[in-house]
Amino acid sequence: MAKITFLGAARTVTGSKYLIEAEGKRLLIDCGLFEGSKDLKQRNWDRIPVDVASIDWVLLTHAHIDHTGYLPRLVRSGFRGPIYANVATRELCELLLPDSAHLQEEDAQFAARKAYSSHKPPLPLYTLAESQAALAQFRDIPSNAPFTISSQFSVRPHQAGHILGATWLELTITENNKQTVVVFSGDVGRYDQPILKDPESPTHADILLCESTYGDRDHETGSVADALADVINSTAKRGGALVIPAFAVDRTQLLMYYLRVLQEQEKIPQLPVYLDSPMAINTTILYIRHRTDYDLKPQENLDPLNAQQVHMTRTVEDSKKINDVVSPCIIISASGMITGGRVLHHLARRLPDSRSTVLLVGYQAEGSGGRALLDGARYLRIHGEEVPVRAQVVEIGQLSAHAGRSELLRWLSCLQALPRQTFLVHGEPNALDSFRNAIASQYHWPVTIPDYLQSFDLDL
């Protein structure tokens, strides 16, 4: 009997892992890292309650770390099978996974120097060498054509519109000559946005797993460009720095697109822009190379050099020099939820300055530094020190790469028959409950919110 076990993204937005079993074979959909609170991060260190060596395959929806970041740990624990992904996702993982390992090694070393960790000595979750070992097990599959994994599993990916290479998966499970179609939403993107194509919608699903990141609300309406221009102009007028913690994949490229447009339209001053993320720089190169995956007009492109006064800082030394900039400037750096990376150093320098602004442009999970700022924290703990928050904190919700509540309902609207069961995943409790009510009200479908490590028979 086919079965699913929720090894992650159950009542939380991180750690996506769904184990599918049929005829003795095991397929893991996504293999993400838990991020946010201390309790969630601890799950990354806990042993998965499954014999890792018994997992036959891994299949990825997209490259974000909360969907792929546990892969090196999985391989370290004994997984030896292929990791299936499309070319764009694989190429992004070639950037993201080593970067994740590097950040963890760097944070462990810093914790050892500052002696603020309870672990003696502090250790990384996995190493750079272990991330490379995981990458060696990647195998390319089509982006939008059927692919047979085994006699039990075949898959057809579809455009998700979330980041470069992002797909939702139409998985057909064959067991005892009976077929069951399971749809995994991955992360559903936005409609009518620059750069990426709109998400496709599913038309059939026996079993549906739908993300619910913004299941309780829609994104703000209004012009992103105008909102961004207002923040830039007000910060420049005060003489401060604008620090934008931004995800290296998609969010940074979208910001660079809007900055170029605003500069060309002379709606913002010509400020120096510091793109302080080697991974974001390399990701932008990938976006340029995969032009068929987005829908910009032929005359448009994503090259950050098209924005004036852009400084791309790859080295640590160049990153440190940004601390010496006292005139108004724009600093774009990772991580997007303020959970690590170079942006922490910029925030330690700029948060105490009331002239400066921190602009949040993506989802901020519970327990993250970004969520603390959104919730009005007066101090932010950075590298073991309490940094006072005097800078303005602003959020532009329109820049999210996740579908809002109405967009998720729109994505579901093309299903021609109600699924036997709908599981809501990848959401915090309020979002899950609210979206369950919305589906029940609009579509009258049976909806389940699974618990962490809970299993279900898919034939029932």
Image: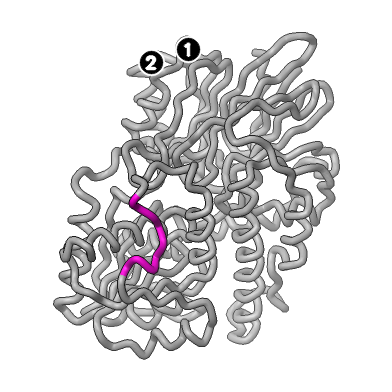
Q: Residue at x 78, y 58 (%)?
A: 133
Label 1: few (<14), some or many (≥20) within 10 Å?
some
Q: Residue at x 54, y 64 (%)?
A: 282
Q: Quadrant of residue 22?
A: top right
Badge count = 2
Q: Residue furthest front?
A: 299
Across and down, in percent, residue 390 comes to 26, 77
Q: Quadrant of residue 347?
A: bottom left
Which sits in the foreground, 452 or 206? Answer: 206
Which sits in the foreground, 389 or 271? Answer: 271
Q: CA distance from mark 2 to mark 1?
A: 8 Å
Q: Residue at x 80, y 38 (%)?
A: 55
Q: Amino acid at mark 1?
A: Leu
Tell me which numbered mark, 2 or 1, is placed earlier along the sequence.
1
Magenta residue span: 299-307
Helix, strand or loop at mark 2: loop
Seen in the image, is 383 located left or right of residue 408? right
Across and down, in percent, residue 21 comes to 75, 27
Q: Quadrant of residue 240?
A: bottom left
- Label 1 sits on residue: 418
Q: Amino acid at mark 2?
A: Tyr
What secondary structure characterizes most of the magenta part?
loop
CB atoms at circles 2 and 1 under 8 Å apart? yes
Question: Quadrant of the image for the C terminus?
Answer: top right
Which sits in the foreground, 432 or 442? Answer: 442
Label 2: few (<14), some or many (≥20) within 10 Å?
few
